[in-house]
């Protein structure tokens, strides 16, 4: 057989090797690409889920707070049958110059009046004030005692507190009530059986009475006295109502020149009111 025929037949013998090699290269490239793709996919950053925003709790806005209704004040002592002079004789009066004048004009003896030697008293002075105390069994030899010691020594059956006009313009409500309440407490601690009566402040003549002693302040302070009386469970004696005129001031027939002291004859009216608004 001719040689050139043998060479042509020999060529296909190497073809499988070539194809196998090519196939290996293709497989290698495929594996490489697949592996690389997976590596890249694994190394790719995975977006972190964004956290949900924290829930914001919105507190409900409170509506305007309603003003509390004021506590009802105690009713003033009602009118009673005339308790007579014997009722007045059982009373002791703690007060200022208005109370002192009641004894000075002879309507009650000094043994029934608790006033300092200077003949006047301010509410804020009560913790340290010395009373010119006249013992009933030795009225010619008064002694100066604190209000608490006077209560302990006298043990009065009734005590009418007639204070507040002096100093009401310089005390706010809390201070006024605190001084008044502390006064009541100090008396009852030393004389627990005493029946205390809280008396109103008298009206004044506006523009004539000393600075700060005005009817506006009188009305305000009387309300405070009523509040303290209610808190302490004590009666309120409203002598204010018989002295006030239609304009809200001290009636002219009862006023002295200074605009806040009352005339001598006015005490007769006041004591008559006390007798017909008795506290038993």
Image (cartoon, rainbow, N blue to C red):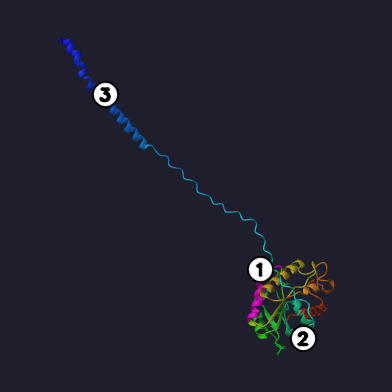
Could you classify mark 3 by the number of other residues whose Cα lies within 10 Å: few (under 14), some (14-19), or many (20 or more)?
A: few
> With 34 as the anchor, is 2 left or right in this view?
left
From the image, tell me which residue sits under label 1: 174
Q: Measured from the top left, where is residue 119 in percent x and y?
A: 73, 78
Q: Earlier in the sequence, mark 1 or mark 3?
A: 3
Q: Residue furthest left?
A: 1
Sequence-first disc among 2 and 3:
3
Q: Label 1: how many residues lie within 10 Å, few (<14), some (14-19) or many (20+)?
A: few
Label 1 – label 2 distance at C-alpha:
37 Å
Instruction: Determine if residue 7 is in view.
Output: yes
Q: Does residue 128 appear anywhere in the picture?
A: no
User: In which quadrant of the rendered image does the C terminus lie?
Assistant: bottom right
In the image, taking residue 90 as reference, residue 18 lies left or right, namely left
- In the picture of the structure, the residue carrying the numbered disc 2 is 86
Residue ID at (73%, 70%): 222
Percent x, y for residue 146?
65, 80
Tag 3 secondary structure: helix
Q: In the image shown, does 14 or 106 lie closer to the viewer?
A: 14
Mostly what secondary structure, the magenta segment?
helix
């Amino acid at each position: 057989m001719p040689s050139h025929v043998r060479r042509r037949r020999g060529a296909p013998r190497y073809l499988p090797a070539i194809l196998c090699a090519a196939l290996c290269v293709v497989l290698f490239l495929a594996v490489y690409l697949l592996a690389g793709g997976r590596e890249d996919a694994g190394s790719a950053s995975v977006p972190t889920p964004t956290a949900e925003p924290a829930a914001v709790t919105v507190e409900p806005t409170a509506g305007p707070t309603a003003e509390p209704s004021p506590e009802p004040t105690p009713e003033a002592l009602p009118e009673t049958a005339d308790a007579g002079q014997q009722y007045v004789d059982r009373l002791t009066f703690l007060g200022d110059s208005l109370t002192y004048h009641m004894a000075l004009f002879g309507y009650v003896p000094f043994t029934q009046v608790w006033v300092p030697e200077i003949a006047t008293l301010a509410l804020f002075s009560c913790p340290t004030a010395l009373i010119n105390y006249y013992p009933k069994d030795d009225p010619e030899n008064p002694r100066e005692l604190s209000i608490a010691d006077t209560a302990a020594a006298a043990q009065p059956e009734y005590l009418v507190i007639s204070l507040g006009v002096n100093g009401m313009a310089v005390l706010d409500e809390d201070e006024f009530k605190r001084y008044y309440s502390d006064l009541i407490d100090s008396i009852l601690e030393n004389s627990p059986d005493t029946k205390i009566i809280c008396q109103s402040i008298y009206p004044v003549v506006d523009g004539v009475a000393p600075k700060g002693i005005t009817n506006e302040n009188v009305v305000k302070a009387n309300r405070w006295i009523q509040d303290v009386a209610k808190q302490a469970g004590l009666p309120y004696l409203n002598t204010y109502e018989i002295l006030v005129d239609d304009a809200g001031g001290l009636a002219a027939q009862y006023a002295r020149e200074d605009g806040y002291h009352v005339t001598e004859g006015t005490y007769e009216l006041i004591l008559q009111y006390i007798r017909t608004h008795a506290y038993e």
